[in-house]
Every structure is written in structure tokens, then in C-alpha cells.
Amino acid sequence: MALNMFRLRATCPFLWKVFQSRPFSYEPLIVQMSKCMDKEEIFDLIERNKATLSEKQVGHAFNVLWRLQRQKTSSIKNVEYVRDHPQFPTLYNLTTNKIESMSDDTLVDVLYIAQRFGVAAHDPLVESLVTEAWKRLDRFNINVLSTFSACLADQHLYCSPLMGEIADIVNRKLDSIQDLRSLSVLMINISSLISQGFQEKLVKKTELLFDTIDSSQVNTARKIVQFLRKVKCSHFPLLERCDKVFLSNMKYLDLDFIGNILAVYRFLQFYSFAFISMAKERLTEMTPLFVHPANFVKLFVILGPMAGPQEKEQLQSTILLMSEELTSQQALAVVRAMEEMESRNSQLITKIASVLHKNLENYRPMELLRITQALIFLHFQSKEVFMKLRELLFSHLKVSVRLSETVTLVCALSMLPSRLDEAVMSQIETFLPQCDFNNLNDFATSVLRWIHYDQVYVDKITEKQLKLLQKLDHYSHQSLQQSNNLDLLLEQIKFLKGDWFHESVLEETISALQHLMDEINYTNIARVGFFISRTHYLNTSILDRIAAVAVQQIEKIHPFSILGIILPFSILNYDPPQKDEFLGTCMQCLHSHLGTLDPLTLVFLGFSLATLEYFPEDLLKAIFNIQFLAKLDCQLEILTSSLNSRVQLRLMELNRAVCLECPEFQIPWFHDRLCQQQYNKDIGSMNGAQKQIYKLLAEVLGGPNFVKASVLTPYYHAVDFECILDKRKKPLPYGSHNITSGKPSRMFWESDIQIVGSSLPPGAERIAFEFLDLKAFCRNIPHLKGKSAMKTRHLEILGYRVIQIPYFEWNSMALSTNDARLDYLRQRIFGERKS
């Protein structure tokens, strides 16, 4: 080479001068590009070599520019810098001229990076790249196909024919795909176009490939859970495996990643106590790093709802200091988080409401609904704010032409003090033919709120209001009668509740479920169970089907689903055929997961089984030990106050049931303090029926000193009334007591827990009178529910003879006179009727 240079210089002085004037490098151009440290160097190379750049070098130039871009902190500013650079048009033109000769990888990489640099979807370059890629679609390998699908997703072409072709290719080639990272990207992007069968195939393929990924591939695991969220599939085995990947990489996860995963878990109703605990610890460590309002708001929204009392106060104090700097969207995020945190910080509530008030005109209808809900929940009171909200909601409603927006606006308006005017009713009626079941429920709930307001302040219901409710009933019944797919029906009725649903369409909904109950299988059995549990409607055909599917398909059912399966039997106090086989099969499914199920689920499971008189020893030992209870205490700290109270109550009730019904397990009673606190709060007045019963019992038994009201038994069961009969069935008087018909005092038997009979004269019996109101029975038939039946068992174990007085008997025409009621009580107590 040196000799050739010498000859060139000697023989061609002119050519040597030209050659010498150009920078010379022994390295190929691609290597030179790779060594560039800033964008100016790359653009300089492009300008100097534009006449000779190959399609491969053009592609590499884009790659290097993108690598340099990702190293910058101010991404938006740097994107504009690249796109507006004087030499970018040169690269643009070179790319346009070389599209057809590019390799598949280069073609799609250039498209991906061009979009990242803000080249619009309608730009001729992007259109040409997409068109060329479409021609080659069938020959793309899985990596190129996944990147191309991401490019289409960036253009929001999720439901386009082109994305449909990609879905078809994935379906045809699924068996040969071995790269889960690329497959996970494709799964997300084609999720809007796949059938139920294709979805199941993708889930199974993901399970098969999961072990091929490294435990550090958190982004692949994140894409998998995002896919499950998009297709609304709570596939617990995959969620568990992804959860393990997140837990093993928690120290590397940032605020946005943690917030995203928590949101997906909440949507899919997947509860990972380990992830929440570790995320809370990680976010608490990161807190000092977030001093800018934008980042601190994100932290407040994610950490606030699961923080302990002291942490919540610190977070609220800090956000209060930043409140003046908050944008409209940040204030909205904060008030929604405060609602979830059940905040009672009046100063912060007032401050955030002030920021919201200033920006009310900038919010969309759905945001106005969320603001309304949050402010009402937080007990914020300001006539000015709510009047402004109502004015804005009405103005949006007048011009709304979309069903979803109209439903949102009607829901928000109905929460504010106002009357249901004819314009709103007409607008609702216009949309009725387009409504699905959820829309109908939202409209009906809103209309009933308005009607209640009118009854209170105007004392009348108009004929038009009644006709609107009738139309809502008609369309809802029509929708239910046309239901022909169980999974679609379950999706529509998942969150239904309220007076209208229970009074107008519950029976029709149960009929629709019964019609489709042959479709109950391992994938939807828990959803059916949870829905039936919420309705309190006893349908033995559906429950028998649930039990049969559980026994037949238990190997396919995940332990997380067992609570939903057992719950309706527990609540409704129904024993299916072959009860022992059914419950034994469910426990067999749970057995290997007792150490991994979260404490909250185990407590609810234990209580549900106890109401069914089923006490598996291994489950009880898993719950009643020091390690479990310590773990439960930690979990209680991150629950809302209402859920916290409910869990503690269920644990107490389970503890009581085990002590009374399974003394052989020797599990100690440790809820005295909690019960005393609870019952000190609950002391209240008798209702009308109880006052009446108390007065008549005193008459039947011989005086008020022969009956005691509001008695607390050992283990803290509350008994409405109590009396004692000797062996000749003669009432025995109590000593002095301070019962009044207004506020009965709580009366304990003894300071120590003991069985009733030991403190009675020989042959005497203690009688408990229980007035059973509407809540004690199933909604459709007078069948005693699980908790009431369990209480009766416990009172009998304690030595009581229990006399139940159902509301439908006490309020019946047969007992419409005092004499009839006295006769009724005598017969129940003494077994005799007045002649």
C-alpha cells in the first residue's frame, strides 16, 4: 500500500493533490459511523458520502442516530434537533431512493427509527416503507415481524387489515415460534383482533416458552401481563410466573414500571402481597429522590394508597407544599389518589379542590365524573365548586353525540343536587337502543338518584320518569333474553349492583345465567361464583353446576379461583350434592399453595369453609400460627380501612367458629380486645320490631325482669333477647337490670368464657330470641344465609335453645294483632297455644 502511494504521488501529482484533500480513513464507513459520539459527526459523514452510501449504510446511520438519541436526557428536544437538522433531508432522500433494495431488517429498523424521530404516519417516506414491508410480510422472521407490528401500533393501526394479516401469520406459524420476547410484542399488538381460541393458544405457547427467558427479562414479563390485561384474561399461572420475575428484579424497577404493574394487577384482580410489600419498600427508599412535582405526584398516586398512616401523613404534607405548582392533570391524579387513600386531611382537600376549580373548564367529561366522585367521597363542601361542575356537565351534555360520553355525563350530574329535567330524559331515551347492559344500569342508577332527590325535595314522581324507568327495564330484559354467550354476559354484569339491578333485572339475569350454565367451565367458574355471591340469590341449578365443574375440572383450576367457587355456597348456606367430595376436591387444589396464597385470601377461605361446617386442619394450622399472623398484620397496614376492618372481623369469626366447633384443635381464643372495641362502637337503639318483641316477651314471661335484651355471649355473639326457664318451664327472674326501650345495655354472662349450662340450675334452659330481618335470608326465598345459620349453631353449642322470629312471620297478616303475637310467642317458648 505504501509503495502504491509513492508511485501515485510520483506519476500523478494532480490526482495526488485531489486525493490528499479528502479525509482518508482505512476503516469502512460503517465502522466510522459506529465510532461517532454525537449527531453532528454522523450527519457530516452522510453529507460527505451521500453519493456512495449503500442501503446498508443508510440503515446503519439511522441506528447510530437512534443510539445517540437514547443516551440523551431531554428526548423531545433532541428528536426535534435531528428531524430539523439541515442534513436530515439528505438522509431522508437517500432512504426514499433505496427502500426496495433494503434488507428486511434494515427496512423495518429504518421505519421504526423514523417514527421515533417524529416522521408522521402520513409522510411519503413512512408510507413507502410500510407499503414495501406489507409486500414482504410473509417472509419476515419473527423479530422483524414484531418490530413492524410495533410500528403499526405507533400509528394506532391495531384493527387495520395489515395488522390482521400479521395476526394470521402468527396464528399459522405459532408452533415454530421460539422467541418469547418477539412473541410478547406481537401478542400485545394483535390483541384487538384475536378470537377466544387464538387467545388460549397464545397463552399456552407463552407458558411453554416462559422457561426459555432469562429471569432478568422484566420487559418481556411486563409485556405478557399487559397482553393479559388487554384481553381481560386473569390467567393466574402466567401472572404468578411473571410476578416472580418482577420480585427478583425489584431493585432495578423504576416508579413508572411499578405503577404500571400495580395497575395491571388491580385490573386483573391478581393480588400479590409479596409484590406490594416489596414495591412499597422500594418506593419508600426512592422517595427522597422525587423533589419535582411531576415525579412526586406519580409517587403519591402509586405509594399513597398502600402506605401506612405515618407515611400517608408525610406524603400529604409534601404534596400540600407543592399544591400551588400542580397542573390540572396532576391535581386530578392527586384527588383520585386521596379518594383511594380515604384521606381526611381537610386542608389538602380544600387546596386540591381549589386547583381543580381553577381548571374545571379544561377537563373532559370522564375527568369531570372522576372529580365529582372524589370530592363527594372526600366530603368536600363548596356550593361554588359544585355549581360550576353542574353547569359544565350540563353544557357538555347538551352537545354530546356519543353514548359513552352521555352515560358519563348523566352519572356525574345525578351525583349533584339537581332535578331530572325533560331534556336529559329525552337524551337518555335517544340512546337506549344503542345501550349495552352496563350502560342501561348506569342510566337507571342515575335516574333513580334523581327520583329520590325529587321525592325528598318535591315530593312527587312524574309520569315521564316512570315511563323512562319502564323503558330501561324493557331494554335490559331484551338484552338479557338475547344473551347467547356466557363469557360476554359475565363481562357485562361483572360490576352491576344497586337498587335498580336487584329490583328490576336480577331475576332475568339469573335466568340468563341458568340458560347458559352448560358453558360454565374452569376458565369462568370463579367469575360465576363471585357474581352469585353478590346477588344473594339462591339458584340451586347454577350452584350444582358450579360444584360439578369444580369436581370434574379441578386439575385445570388455579388455587386463586377456589375462593370464588366456595363463596356462593358459604354465603347462601347451600350444600350441593356430594358436598364432602366437592369441598375435599377444592381443598386438595389448595393444599400445595397454602404457603404461597396471600394471608387475606386464606382468612376469607377459612371463614367461608367454616360457615359450611368444614374445618380442614391443614388450612387452620396455616392460619393460626405466629408467622402467618405477623404476615397478616403487615398486610393489614396496606389495606383501606374498610377492608382492614372486614379482614379482622372475618379472622375473629373464624377464630370463634374453630373454638366452638373444633375444640380438639386447641386453637386459643385471642379476640377479646377487638370484640370489646367493636361492641362498644356498636351499642345502638332497638328498631321498631325489636321494641315490640321486647314488650310482648315481658308480658308473656311475667314482667320485664324475666327477659334480658342485647346480651353478649361468650365469644361475643350478640343475642337480641334472652330468658331462662326452669325444669318446669317456669321463667326465672334476673336480678336488677338497666334495660330501656331506647338504648339497651350490653350484658355479659361471665368474665370468663364457659358453657351456658354450668351456670344454670339443674334442668333449666337458656333461650335466645333472634329477630331475623331481610338481610338474614336469601333474596328470592326465605332460606337462612350462612352467617345466620352458623350463629344458630354456635348458640346451640353454648347451651341455648334458639327461637328465631323471621320478619316475614312477625309482619304477616296472621300476626296482625297483639293477641296473635302473644299467642305466637307463647307457642314458640312453651309449646302451647292460647285456647
Image (cartoon, rainbow, N blue to C red):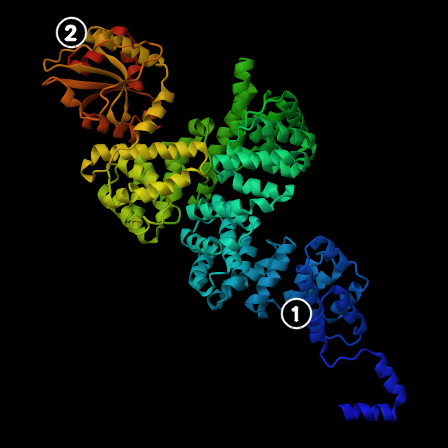
User: Can you say which quadrant of the picture contains the N terminus?
Assistant: bottom right
Nearest the viewer among 639 and 560 is 639
Given residues 31 and 2, the one toward you in this image is 2
Could you say where residue 325 lies in the image, as x and y percent from the top left? 68, 37
Q: Residue at x 29, y 15 (%)?
A: 810
Q: Position of residue 678 (x, y in %)?
A: 36, 25
Q: Nearer the viewer, mark 1 or mark 2?
A: 1
Left or right of residue 134: residue 275: left
Quadrant housing residue 398: top right
Residue hosting label 1: 106
Residue density around tag 2, few if under 14, some if 14–19, many if 20 or more, within 10 Å:
few
Give how far across and how far down residue 591 sits, in percent. 29, 50
717 up-or-down from 659: above or below: above
- 807 to 374, vertically: above or below: above
Amino acid marked by disc 2? Ser
Find residue 835 and name its label. 2
Circle 1 packing at 10 Å, graded few (<14), some (14-19), many (20+), is many
Q: Is residue 372 left or right of residue 682?
A: right
